[in-house]
Amino acid sequence: MAIPIPSRQLFIDGEWRDPVLKKRIPIVNPATEEIGRVPGDIPAATAEDVEIAVDAARRAFSRNKGNDWASASGAFRAKFLRAIAAKILERKSELAKLEVVDTGKPLDEATSDMDSVAACFKYYAELAEALGAKQRAPISLPMQSFKGHVLKEPIGVVALITPWNYPLLMAAWKVAPALAAGCTAILKPSELASMTCLELAEVCKEVALPPGVLNILTGLGSEAGALLASHPRVDKIAFTGSTPTGIKIMTAAAQMVKPVSLELGGKSPIILFEDVDLDKAAEWTIFGCFLTSGQICSATSRLLVHESIAAKFLEILIDWSKNIKISDPMEEGCRLGAVASKGQYKKIMNFISTAKSDGATILYGGVRPQHLKKGFFIEPTIITDVSTSMQIWREEVFGPVLCVKTFTTEEEAIELANDTNYGLGAAVISKDLEKCERLSKTLQAGIVWVNCSQPCFYQAPWGGYKHSGIGRELGEWGLENYLSLKQVTQYVSDEPWGWYPPPSNQ
Ligand code: NAD
Protein backbone atom coordinates (compact mmCIF):
# COMPACT_ATOMS: atom_id res chain seq x y z
CA MET A 1 0.00 0.00 0.00
CA ALA A 2 1.67 3.24 -1.14
CA ILE A 3 1.58 6.04 1.41
CA PRO A 4 1.00 9.47 -0.15
CA ILE A 5 4.07 11.56 0.70
CA PRO A 6 3.48 15.32 0.65
CA SER A 7 6.12 17.37 -1.14
CA ARG A 8 7.10 20.19 1.22
CA GLN A 9 9.25 23.30 1.31
CA LEU A 10 10.95 24.99 4.24
CA PHE A 11 8.60 26.66 6.72
CA ILE A 12 9.69 30.22 7.48
CA ASP A 13 7.72 33.16 8.83
CA GLY A 14 4.44 31.24 8.59
CA GLU A 15 4.93 30.43 4.89
CA TRP A 16 6.25 27.58 2.75
CA ARG A 17 9.39 28.68 0.91
CA ASP A 18 11.76 26.90 -1.43
CA PRO A 19 15.32 26.78 -0.14
CA VAL A 20 17.22 29.68 -1.70
CA LEU A 21 19.66 27.28 -3.42
CA LYS A 22 16.79 24.84 -4.27
CA LYS A 23 18.71 21.91 -2.74
CA ARG A 24 16.82 18.76 -1.72
CA ILE A 25 17.69 15.52 0.09
CA PRO A 26 16.16 12.19 -1.02
CA ILE A 27 14.06 10.24 1.49
CA VAL A 28 15.03 6.59 2.02
CA ASN A 29 12.45 4.09 3.27
CA PRO A 30 14.53 1.80 5.53
CA ALA A 31 12.03 -1.06 5.35
CA THR A 32 12.03 -1.24 1.52
CA GLU A 33 15.27 0.58 0.62
CA GLU A 34 13.26 2.69 -1.84
CA ILE A 35 14.97 6.02 -2.32
CA GLY A 36 13.98 9.38 -3.72
CA ARG A 37 11.44 8.87 -6.50
CA VAL A 38 8.83 6.94 -4.50
CA PRO A 39 9.24 8.30 -0.98
CA GLY A 40 10.22 11.70 -2.38
CA ASP A 41 12.58 14.26 -0.90
CA ILE A 42 12.89 17.05 1.65
CA PRO A 43 14.25 20.58 1.28
CA ALA A 44 17.82 21.27 2.39
CA ALA A 45 18.37 24.63 4.06
CA THR A 46 21.68 26.41 3.60
CA ALA A 47 23.20 29.57 5.13
CA GLU A 48 20.84 31.82 3.12
CA ASP A 49 17.74 30.11 4.55
CA VAL A 50 19.14 30.09 8.09
CA GLU A 51 19.51 33.90 7.91
CA ILE A 52 15.91 34.36 6.72
CA ALA A 53 14.58 32.02 9.43
CA VAL A 54 16.58 33.70 12.21
CA ASP A 55 15.28 37.11 11.05
CA ALA A 56 11.70 35.80 11.11
CA ALA A 57 12.07 34.29 14.58
CA ARG A 58 13.63 37.52 15.90
CA ARG A 59 10.80 39.63 14.46
CA ALA A 60 8.18 37.33 16.00
CA PHE A 61 9.94 37.52 19.36
CA SER A 62 9.78 41.29 19.46
CA ARG A 63 7.45 42.38 16.66
CA ASN A 64 5.87 45.38 18.38
CA LYS A 65 6.72 45.50 22.01
CA GLY A 66 3.64 44.42 23.96
CA ASN A 67 2.09 42.62 21.01
CA ASP A 68 4.52 39.80 20.42
CA TRP A 69 4.76 36.11 21.28
CA ALA A 70 7.15 36.76 24.18
CA SER A 71 4.85 39.15 26.01
CA ALA A 72 1.55 37.46 25.10
CA SER A 73 -0.23 35.83 28.02
CA GLY A 74 0.30 32.16 28.78
CA ALA A 75 -3.39 31.63 28.06
CA PHE A 76 -2.93 33.07 24.55
CA ARG A 77 0.00 30.76 23.86
CA ALA A 78 -1.81 27.78 25.39
CA LYS A 79 -4.65 28.17 22.90
CA PHE A 80 -2.25 27.48 20.02
CA LEU A 81 -0.55 24.57 21.79
CA ARG A 82 -3.93 22.91 22.37
CA ALA A 83 -4.96 23.53 18.77
CA ILE A 84 -1.72 21.89 17.58
CA ALA A 85 -2.42 18.88 19.85
CA ALA A 86 -5.93 18.53 18.43
CA LYS A 87 -4.69 18.65 14.82
CA ILE A 88 -1.99 16.05 15.56
CA LEU A 89 -4.67 13.70 16.89
CA GLU A 90 -6.89 14.40 13.90
CA ARG A 91 -4.04 13.43 11.54
CA LYS A 92 -2.61 10.72 13.80
CA SER A 93 -2.95 7.80 11.41
CA GLU A 94 -1.40 9.65 8.44
CA LEU A 95 1.44 11.07 10.57
CA ALA A 96 2.19 7.65 12.06
CA LYS A 97 2.52 6.17 8.57
CA LEU A 98 4.92 8.92 7.49
CA GLU A 99 6.98 8.21 10.61
CA VAL A 100 7.13 4.52 9.64
CA VAL A 101 8.33 5.35 6.10
CA ASP A 102 11.06 7.59 7.56
CA THR A 103 12.25 5.45 10.47
CA GLY A 104 11.25 1.83 9.80
CA LYS A 105 9.62 1.54 13.25
CA PRO A 106 6.44 -0.55 13.69
CA LEU A 107 3.19 1.28 12.96
CA ASP A 108 1.86 0.54 16.48
CA GLU A 109 4.87 2.32 17.96
CA ALA A 110 4.58 5.28 15.61
CA THR A 111 0.87 5.60 16.41
CA SER A 112 1.58 5.62 20.12
CA ASP A 113 4.33 8.24 19.49
CA MET A 114 1.68 10.52 17.93
CA ASP A 115 -0.50 10.20 21.05
CA SER A 116 2.53 11.20 23.12
CA VAL A 117 3.21 14.17 20.82
CA ALA A 118 -0.34 15.47 21.30
CA ALA A 119 -0.19 14.84 25.07
CA CYS A 120 3.08 16.79 25.28
CA PHE A 121 1.56 19.85 23.56
CA LYS A 122 -1.48 19.67 25.88
CA TYR A 123 0.72 19.34 28.95
CA TYR A 124 2.77 22.43 28.07
CA ALA A 125 -0.43 24.34 27.29
CA GLU A 126 -1.31 23.86 30.98
CA LEU A 127 2.16 24.96 32.06
CA ALA A 128 1.94 28.04 29.82
CA GLU A 129 -1.30 29.02 31.57
CA ALA A 130 0.22 28.42 35.00
CA LEU A 131 3.27 30.54 34.19
CA GLY A 132 1.40 33.80 34.81
CA ALA A 133 0.68 32.83 38.43
CA LYS A 134 4.38 32.08 38.97
CA GLN A 135 5.44 35.59 37.91
CA ARG A 136 6.47 38.18 40.50
CA ALA A 137 7.24 35.55 43.14
CA PRO A 138 8.32 37.67 46.12
CA ILE A 139 11.85 37.33 47.48
CA SER A 140 12.21 37.60 51.22
CA LEU A 141 14.91 40.24 51.78
CA PRO A 142 16.71 40.93 55.05
CA MET A 143 16.08 44.75 54.91
CA GLN A 144 12.60 46.23 55.25
CA SER A 145 13.52 49.20 53.08
CA PHE A 146 13.63 46.89 50.05
CA LYS A 147 11.25 44.52 48.43
CA GLY A 148 11.96 42.20 45.55
CA HIS A 149 10.39 39.77 43.16
CA VAL A 150 11.39 37.41 40.37
CA LEU A 151 10.29 37.55 36.74
CA LYS A 152 10.55 34.51 34.48
CA GLU A 153 11.16 35.68 30.94
CA PRO A 154 11.50 33.75 27.70
CA ILE A 155 15.17 33.30 26.79
CA GLY A 156 14.69 34.54 23.20
CA VAL A 157 15.12 32.87 19.83
CA VAL A 158 15.99 29.21 20.31
CA ALA A 159 17.37 26.63 17.89
CA LEU A 160 16.00 23.14 18.46
CA ILE A 161 18.08 20.37 16.88
CA THR A 162 16.64 16.87 17.00
CA PRO A 163 17.49 13.23 16.05
CA TRP A 164 15.81 10.62 13.83
CA ASN A 165 14.72 7.93 16.29
CA TYR A 166 11.50 9.66 17.47
CA PRO A 167 11.34 12.50 14.94
CA LEU A 168 8.11 14.26 15.88
CA LEU A 169 8.18 13.28 19.56
CA MET A 170 11.71 14.63 20.15
CA ALA A 171 10.65 17.81 18.34
CA ALA A 172 7.53 18.09 20.55
CA TRP A 173 9.65 17.75 23.72
CA LYS A 174 11.38 20.96 22.65
CA VAL A 175 8.85 22.92 20.59
CA ALA A 176 6.03 22.66 23.15
CA PRO A 177 7.94 24.01 26.19
CA ALA A 178 9.85 26.59 24.10
CA LEU A 179 6.61 28.05 22.72
CA ALA A 180 4.89 27.76 26.11
CA ALA A 181 7.70 29.83 27.65
CA GLY A 182 7.27 32.56 25.01
CA CYS A 183 10.38 31.80 22.98
CA THR A 184 10.30 31.76 19.20
CA ALA A 185 12.03 28.84 17.58
CA ILE A 186 13.80 27.31 14.63
CA LEU A 187 13.45 23.55 14.54
CA LYS A 188 16.11 21.58 12.65
CA PRO A 189 15.10 17.90 12.52
CA SER A 190 17.41 15.11 11.40
CA GLU A 191 17.98 14.91 7.65
CA LEU A 192 17.29 11.15 7.97
CA ALA A 193 13.69 11.63 9.17
CA SER A 194 12.04 15.01 8.73
CA MET A 195 8.66 14.29 7.20
CA THR A 196 6.49 14.54 10.29
CA CYS A 197 8.27 17.71 11.41
CA LEU A 198 7.38 19.26 8.04
CA GLU A 199 3.78 18.19 8.65
CA LEU A 200 3.99 19.99 12.01
CA ALA A 201 4.59 23.09 9.89
CA GLU A 202 1.35 22.44 8.01
CA VAL A 203 -0.40 22.03 11.37
CA CYS A 204 1.01 25.40 12.50
CA LYS A 205 -0.38 26.99 9.34
CA GLU A 206 -3.79 25.40 9.91
CA VAL A 207 -4.03 26.70 13.48
CA ALA A 208 -2.76 30.14 12.35
CA LEU A 209 0.22 30.21 14.68
CA PRO A 210 1.58 33.76 14.35
CA PRO A 211 4.25 33.99 11.61
CA GLY A 212 7.82 33.39 12.71
CA VAL A 213 6.95 31.81 16.06
CA LEU A 214 8.01 28.37 14.81
CA ASN A 215 10.20 28.00 11.74
CA ILE A 216 11.14 24.57 10.46
CA LEU A 217 14.36 24.14 8.52
CA THR A 218 15.18 20.69 7.24
CA GLY A 219 18.70 20.06 6.04
CA LEU A 220 22.10 18.69 6.87
CA GLY A 221 23.40 18.82 10.42
CA SER A 222 26.83 19.83 9.20
CA GLU A 223 25.26 22.76 7.31
CA ALA A 224 21.96 24.12 8.71
CA GLY A 225 22.54 22.58 12.17
CA ALA A 226 26.08 23.88 12.56
CA LEU A 227 25.07 27.36 11.32
CA LEU A 228 22.28 27.56 13.88
CA ALA A 229 24.55 26.39 16.70
CA SER A 230 27.07 29.15 15.98
CA HIS A 231 24.59 31.87 15.01
CA PRO A 232 25.11 35.12 16.97
CA ARG A 233 21.38 35.97 16.91
CA VAL A 234 20.22 32.62 18.30
CA ASP A 235 19.99 32.88 22.06
CA LYS A 236 19.96 29.21 23.06
CA ILE A 237 20.49 25.74 21.60
CA ALA A 238 18.46 22.76 22.75
CA PHE A 239 19.94 19.61 21.26
CA THR A 240 19.14 15.91 21.27
CA GLY A 241 21.53 13.61 19.49
CA SER A 242 24.85 11.88 19.80
CA THR A 243 27.54 12.85 22.29
CA PRO A 244 30.13 13.74 19.59
CA THR A 245 27.66 16.18 17.95
CA GLY A 246 26.73 17.52 21.40
CA ILE A 247 30.41 18.33 21.99
CA LYS A 248 30.57 20.24 18.67
CA ILE A 249 27.45 22.21 19.55
CA MET A 250 28.68 23.06 23.02
CA THR A 251 32.02 24.19 21.57
CA ALA A 252 30.27 26.47 19.04
CA ALA A 253 27.92 27.87 21.69
CA ALA A 254 30.77 28.51 24.13
CA GLN A 255 32.23 31.15 21.78
CA MET A 256 29.13 33.26 22.47
CA VAL A 257 28.47 32.11 26.06
CA LYS A 258 25.23 30.76 24.65
CA PRO A 259 23.25 28.42 26.93
CA VAL A 260 22.83 24.84 25.76
CA SER A 261 20.76 21.93 26.93
CA LEU A 262 21.98 18.57 25.70
CA GLU A 263 20.21 15.22 25.63
CA LEU A 264 22.87 12.80 24.46
CA GLY A 265 23.66 9.12 24.19
CA GLY A 266 23.66 6.33 26.72
CA LYS A 267 24.77 2.79 27.55
CA SER A 268 22.31 2.05 30.29
CA PRO A 269 22.36 -1.01 32.56
CA ILE A 270 19.51 -3.26 33.65
CA ILE A 271 20.23 -5.25 36.82
CA LEU A 272 18.36 -8.46 37.59
CA PHE A 273 18.64 -9.90 41.10
CA GLU A 274 18.11 -13.55 42.00
CA ASP A 275 14.55 -13.08 43.31
CA VAL A 276 12.95 -11.86 40.07
CA ASP A 277 9.98 -13.39 38.29
CA LEU A 278 11.87 -14.65 35.23
CA ASP A 279 9.15 -14.07 32.62
CA LYS A 280 8.30 -10.58 33.84
CA ALA A 281 12.00 -9.74 33.90
CA ALA A 282 12.43 -11.14 30.37
CA GLU A 283 9.68 -8.92 29.02
CA TRP A 284 11.13 -5.77 30.60
CA THR A 285 14.62 -6.71 29.40
CA ILE A 286 13.33 -7.09 25.85
CA PHE A 287 11.19 -3.96 25.99
CA GLY A 288 14.17 -2.07 27.45
CA CYS A 289 16.57 -3.05 24.68
CA PHE A 290 14.66 -4.04 21.53
CA LEU A 291 11.90 -1.41 21.41
CA THR A 292 12.39 0.83 18.35
CA SER A 293 15.08 -1.69 17.33
CA GLY A 294 17.14 -0.53 20.27
CA GLN A 295 17.48 2.97 18.80
CA ILE A 296 16.58 4.63 22.06
CA CYS A 297 19.03 6.82 23.94
CA SER A 298 18.00 5.24 27.25
CA ALA A 299 17.91 1.61 25.97
CA THR A 300 19.00 -0.69 28.78
CA SER A 301 21.52 -2.48 26.57
CA ARG A 302 23.85 -3.82 29.29
CA LEU A 303 22.21 -6.69 31.17
CA LEU A 304 23.66 -7.53 34.57
CA VAL A 305 22.10 -10.75 35.76
CA HIS A 306 22.73 -12.55 39.05
CA GLU A 307 25.00 -15.54 38.49
CA SER A 308 22.53 -17.95 40.16
CA ILE A 309 19.73 -17.32 37.62
CA ALA A 310 21.78 -16.42 34.54
CA ALA A 311 21.60 -19.74 32.65
CA LYS A 312 17.85 -20.21 33.14
CA PHE A 313 17.13 -16.51 32.44
CA LEU A 314 19.05 -16.53 29.15
CA GLU A 315 17.07 -19.58 27.97
CA ILE A 316 13.85 -17.72 28.72
CA LEU A 317 15.15 -14.55 27.09
CA ILE A 318 15.93 -16.44 23.89
CA ASP A 319 12.37 -17.89 23.88
CA TRP A 320 10.91 -14.39 24.24
CA SER A 321 13.24 -13.05 21.53
CA LYS A 322 12.21 -15.81 19.09
CA ASN A 323 8.61 -14.74 19.62
CA ILE A 324 9.17 -11.12 18.51
CA LYS A 325 7.44 -10.49 15.21
CA ILE A 326 9.96 -8.99 12.76
CA SER A 327 8.24 -7.80 9.62
CA ASP A 328 7.26 -4.97 7.33
CA PRO A 329 6.67 -2.30 9.99
CA MET A 330 3.24 -1.55 8.47
CA GLU A 331 2.12 -5.14 9.17
CA GLU A 332 -0.18 -5.67 12.11
CA GLY A 333 1.54 -7.03 15.21
CA CYS A 334 5.05 -6.09 14.05
CA ARG A 335 7.25 -5.60 17.11
CA LEU A 336 10.65 -5.13 15.45
CA GLY A 337 10.95 -3.05 12.31
CA ALA A 338 13.97 -1.98 10.31
CA VAL A 339 16.75 0.17 11.72
CA ALA A 340 16.55 3.71 10.43
CA SER A 341 19.22 3.88 7.74
CA LYS A 342 21.82 1.96 5.80
CA GLY A 343 24.53 3.77 7.77
CA GLN A 344 22.97 2.67 11.05
CA TYR A 345 22.60 -0.92 9.76
CA LYS A 346 26.29 -1.08 8.82
CA LYS A 347 27.33 0.50 12.12
CA ILE A 348 25.37 -2.08 14.15
CA MET A 349 26.68 -5.00 12.06
CA ASN A 350 30.25 -3.72 12.59
CA PHE A 351 29.67 -3.60 16.35
CA ILE A 352 28.50 -7.24 16.25
CA SER A 353 31.45 -8.44 14.17
CA THR A 354 33.94 -6.55 16.37
CA ALA A 355 32.36 -8.15 19.45
CA LYS A 356 32.85 -11.57 17.82
CA SER A 357 36.46 -10.90 16.95
CA ASP A 358 37.04 -9.56 20.49
CA GLY A 359 36.04 -13.01 21.80
CA ALA A 360 32.37 -12.45 22.74
CA THR A 361 29.69 -15.05 21.93
CA ILE A 362 26.66 -14.16 19.78
CA LEU A 363 24.15 -16.17 21.80
CA TYR A 364 21.17 -15.19 19.65
CA GLY A 365 20.57 -13.14 16.48
CA GLY A 366 23.31 -10.95 15.11
CA VAL A 367 22.14 -11.40 11.52
CA ARG A 368 19.49 -10.23 9.06
CA PRO A 369 16.25 -12.21 9.49
CA GLN A 370 16.15 -14.84 6.73
CA HIS A 371 12.58 -14.10 5.66
CA LEU A 372 13.30 -10.41 4.89
CA LYS A 373 15.43 -9.98 1.79
CA LYS A 374 15.20 -6.19 1.58
CA GLY A 375 15.30 -3.45 4.18
CA PHE A 376 17.67 -2.71 7.05
CA PHE A 377 16.46 -5.45 9.39
CA ILE A 378 18.56 -7.02 12.16
CA GLU A 379 17.43 -9.82 14.48
CA PRO A 380 17.31 -9.04 18.18
CA THR A 381 20.82 -9.90 19.32
CA ILE A 382 22.10 -11.23 22.66
CA ILE A 383 25.84 -11.25 23.29
CA THR A 384 27.57 -13.07 26.18
CA ASP A 385 31.19 -13.70 27.26
CA VAL A 386 31.71 -9.96 27.27
CA SER A 387 34.53 -8.25 29.16
CA THR A 388 34.27 -4.71 30.50
CA SER A 389 37.01 -3.49 28.17
CA MET A 390 35.21 -4.61 25.00
CA GLN A 391 33.78 -2.00 22.63
CA ILE A 392 30.39 -3.74 22.76
CA TRP A 393 30.23 -3.17 26.54
CA ARG A 394 31.47 0.43 26.49
CA GLU A 395 30.05 2.14 23.39
CA GLU A 396 26.49 3.03 22.42
CA VAL A 397 25.35 0.67 19.62
CA PHE A 398 21.92 2.23 19.05
CA GLY A 399 20.55 -1.03 17.68
CA PRO A 400 18.78 -4.22 18.89
CA VAL A 401 21.86 -5.52 20.70
CA LEU A 402 21.95 -6.61 24.33
CA CYS A 403 25.20 -7.57 25.99
CA VAL A 404 25.23 -9.63 29.13
CA LYS A 405 27.42 -10.00 32.21
CA THR A 406 26.82 -11.80 35.47
CA PHE A 407 27.46 -10.66 39.05
CA THR A 408 27.32 -12.23 42.49
CA THR A 409 27.03 -9.32 44.96
CA GLU A 410 25.06 -6.07 45.04
CA GLU A 411 28.33 -4.09 45.26
CA GLU A 412 29.65 -5.81 42.14
CA ALA A 413 26.42 -5.04 40.26
CA ILE A 414 26.63 -1.36 41.21
CA GLU A 415 30.28 -1.13 40.25
CA LEU A 416 29.66 -2.71 36.85
CA ALA A 417 26.55 -0.56 36.26
CA ASN A 418 28.35 2.69 37.03
CA ASP A 419 31.52 1.83 35.10
CA THR A 420 30.59 3.91 32.04
CA ASN A 421 31.07 7.44 30.75
CA TYR A 422 27.31 7.64 30.20
CA GLY A 423 24.56 8.12 32.79
CA LEU A 424 21.16 8.40 31.15
CA GLY A 425 19.09 5.48 32.48
CA ALA A 426 19.41 2.45 34.72
CA ALA A 427 16.91 -0.26 35.64
CA VAL A 428 16.81 -2.50 38.66
CA ILE A 429 14.56 -5.55 38.88
CA SER A 430 14.02 -7.21 42.25
CA LYS A 431 11.22 -8.05 44.69
CA ASP A 432 13.33 -6.55 47.49
CA LEU A 433 12.14 -2.94 47.44
CA GLU A 434 14.67 -1.81 50.04
CA LYS A 435 17.43 -3.05 47.77
CA CYS A 436 15.81 -1.19 44.83
CA GLU A 437 15.70 1.97 46.95
CA ARG A 438 19.40 1.59 47.82
CA LEU A 439 20.30 1.14 44.18
CA SER A 440 18.18 4.04 43.01
CA LYS A 441 20.43 6.24 45.17
CA THR A 442 23.76 4.73 44.11
CA LEU A 443 23.22 4.32 40.39
CA GLN A 444 24.75 7.25 38.51
CA ALA A 445 21.95 8.00 36.07
CA GLY A 446 19.35 10.71 35.52
CA ILE A 447 16.55 8.13 35.28
CA VAL A 448 16.23 5.00 37.44
CA TRP A 449 13.50 2.50 36.63
CA VAL A 450 12.44 0.07 39.35
CA ASN A 451 10.89 -3.20 38.18
CA CYS A 452 10.49 -1.81 34.64
CA SER A 453 12.54 -0.18 31.89
CA GLN A 454 11.74 2.73 29.55
CA PRO A 455 8.31 4.03 30.57
CA CYS A 456 8.50 7.78 30.05
CA PHE A 457 6.08 10.31 31.51
CA TYR A 458 6.22 13.92 30.38
CA GLN A 459 5.55 15.07 33.96
CA ALA A 460 8.94 13.70 35.12
CA PRO A 461 12.41 15.18 34.40
CA TRP A 462 14.35 13.50 31.57
CA GLY A 463 18.09 13.78 31.10
CA GLY A 464 21.44 12.32 31.93
CA TYR A 465 24.48 12.36 34.17
CA LYS A 466 28.05 12.43 32.84
CA HIS A 467 28.38 12.27 29.02
CA SER A 468 24.63 11.74 28.61
CA GLY A 469 23.95 15.44 28.71
CA ILE A 470 23.31 18.72 30.46
CA GLY A 471 19.95 19.89 31.77
CA ARG A 472 16.58 18.19 31.92
CA GLU A 473 13.66 18.07 29.50
CA LEU A 474 9.99 17.41 30.26
CA GLY A 475 7.99 18.39 33.31
CA GLU A 476 8.35 21.88 34.74
CA TRP A 477 12.14 21.50 34.23
CA GLY A 478 11.53 21.37 30.48
CA LEU A 479 9.85 24.77 30.67
CA GLU A 480 12.64 26.25 32.82
CA ASN A 481 15.05 25.39 29.97
CA TYR A 482 13.53 28.24 27.98
CA LEU A 483 13.17 30.84 30.75
CA SER A 484 15.58 33.45 32.10
CA LEU A 485 15.27 34.66 35.66
CA LYS A 486 15.23 38.36 36.41
CA GLN A 487 15.22 39.85 39.91
CA VAL A 488 13.48 43.19 40.44
CA THR A 489 14.59 44.98 43.61
CA GLN A 490 12.77 48.09 44.75
CA TYR A 491 13.68 50.66 47.43
CA VAL A 492 10.45 51.31 49.36
CA SER A 493 11.50 53.45 52.33
CA ASP A 494 10.45 57.13 52.73
CA GLU A 495 13.86 57.79 54.26
CA PRO A 496 16.87 58.75 52.11
CA TRP A 497 19.34 55.91 51.63
CA GLY A 498 21.92 57.92 53.57
CA TRP A 499 25.18 56.34 52.40
CA TYR A 500 26.64 59.61 51.09
CA PRO A 501 26.27 62.88 52.99
CA PRO A 502 23.96 65.29 51.11
CA PRO A 503 25.61 68.39 49.54
CA SER A 504 25.99 71.21 52.16
CA ASN A 505 23.75 73.68 50.19
CA GLN A 506 20.63 71.55 50.91
P1 NAD B 1 23.34 13.08 15.55
O1 NAD B 1 24.15 13.69 16.61
O2 NAD B 1 24.02 12.50 14.38
O3 NAD B 1 22.29 14.15 14.95
C1 NAD B 1 21.33 14.80 15.75
C2 NAD B 1 20.95 16.10 15.08
O4 NAD B 1 22.09 16.95 15.04
C3 NAD B 1 20.48 15.96 13.64
O5 NAD B 1 19.44 16.88 13.40
C4 NAD B 1 21.70 16.35 12.83
O6 NAD B 1 21.38 16.86 11.57
C5 NAD B 1 22.27 17.44 13.72
N1 NAD B 1 23.71 17.70 13.54
C6 NAD B 1 24.67 16.84 13.09
N2 NAD B 1 25.87 17.47 13.09
C7 NAD B 1 25.67 18.71 13.57
C8 NAD B 1 26.53 19.81 13.83
N3 NAD B 1 27.84 19.76 13.59
N4 NAD B 1 25.99 20.94 14.34
C9 NAD B 1 24.66 21.02 14.61
N5 NAD B 1 23.79 20.00 14.38
C10 NAD B 1 24.30 18.86 13.86
O7 NAD B 1 22.40 12.03 16.28
P2 NAD B 1 21.38 11.02 15.61
O8 NAD B 1 22.20 9.96 14.95
O9 NAD B 1 20.37 11.77 14.82
O10 NAD B 1 20.63 10.44 16.90
C11 NAD B 1 21.13 9.37 17.62
C12 NAD B 1 21.77 9.86 18.90
O11 NAD B 1 20.82 10.66 19.62
C13 NAD B 1 22.13 8.72 19.82
O12 NAD B 1 23.41 8.94 20.35
C14 NAD B 1 21.07 8.81 20.92
O13 NAD B 1 21.47 8.28 22.15
C15 NAD B 1 20.80 10.27 20.99
N6 NAD B 1 19.46 10.54 21.57
C16 NAD B 1 19.40 11.02 22.85
C17 NAD B 1 18.15 11.25 23.45
C18 NAD B 1 18.07 11.74 24.88
O14 NAD B 1 16.96 12.10 25.30
N7 NAD B 1 19.15 11.78 25.63
C19 NAD B 1 16.99 11.00 22.73
C20 NAD B 1 17.09 10.53 21.42
C21 NAD B 1 18.35 10.30 20.84
Image (cartoon, helix red, strand yellow):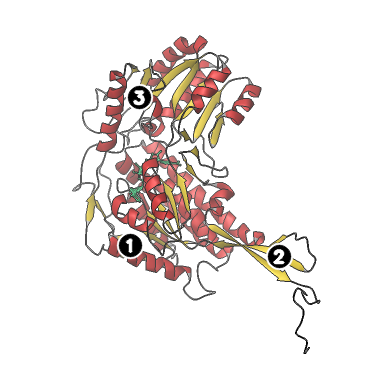
Kindly identify which numbered label has been placed on residue 148: 2
Q: Nearer the viewer, residue 168 or 221?
A: 221
Q: Which of 319 and 272 is in front in this view?
A: 272
Residue 239 visible within the image? yes
In the shown orientation, is residue 221 left or right of residue 91?
A: left
Residue 146, given in percent of the width and then of the height, sits at 75, 67
* Residue 123 against residue 101 in the figure, above or below: below
Residue 458, given in percent of the width and then of the height, sits at 54, 44
Kindly identify which numbered label has been placed on residue 50: 1
Q: Earlier in the sequence, mark 1 or mark 3?
A: 1
How far separated are the C-alphas under marks 1 and 2? 40 Å
Q: Earlier in the sequence, mark 1 or mark 2?
A: 1
Q: Earlier in the sequence, mark 3 or mark 2?
A: 2
* Residue 152 against residue 105 in the figure, above or below: below
How far separated are the C-alphas under marks 3 and 2? 58 Å
Q: Which amino acid does label 3 sit on?
A: Pro
Q: What residue type is labelled 1?
A: Val
**Residue under the point 74% across and 66% down:** 147
Q: Is mark 2 on a helix, strand or loop?
A: strand
In the shown orientation, is residue 12 left or right of residue 350?
A: right
In the shown orientation, is residue 187 left or right of residue 470?
A: left
Residue where numbered disc 3 is placed: 380
* Residue 346 against residue 135 in the figure, above or below: above
Q: Is mark 1 on a helix, strand or loop?
A: helix
**Residue under the point 22% across and 38% down:** 33
Q: Which amino acid does label 2 sit on?
A: Gly
Q: Quadrant of the C terminus?
A: bottom right
Q: In which quarter of the image is the N terminus?
A: top left
How far separated are the C-alphas under marks 1 and 3? 40 Å
Are circles 3 and 2 on residues that touch, CB within 8 Å? no
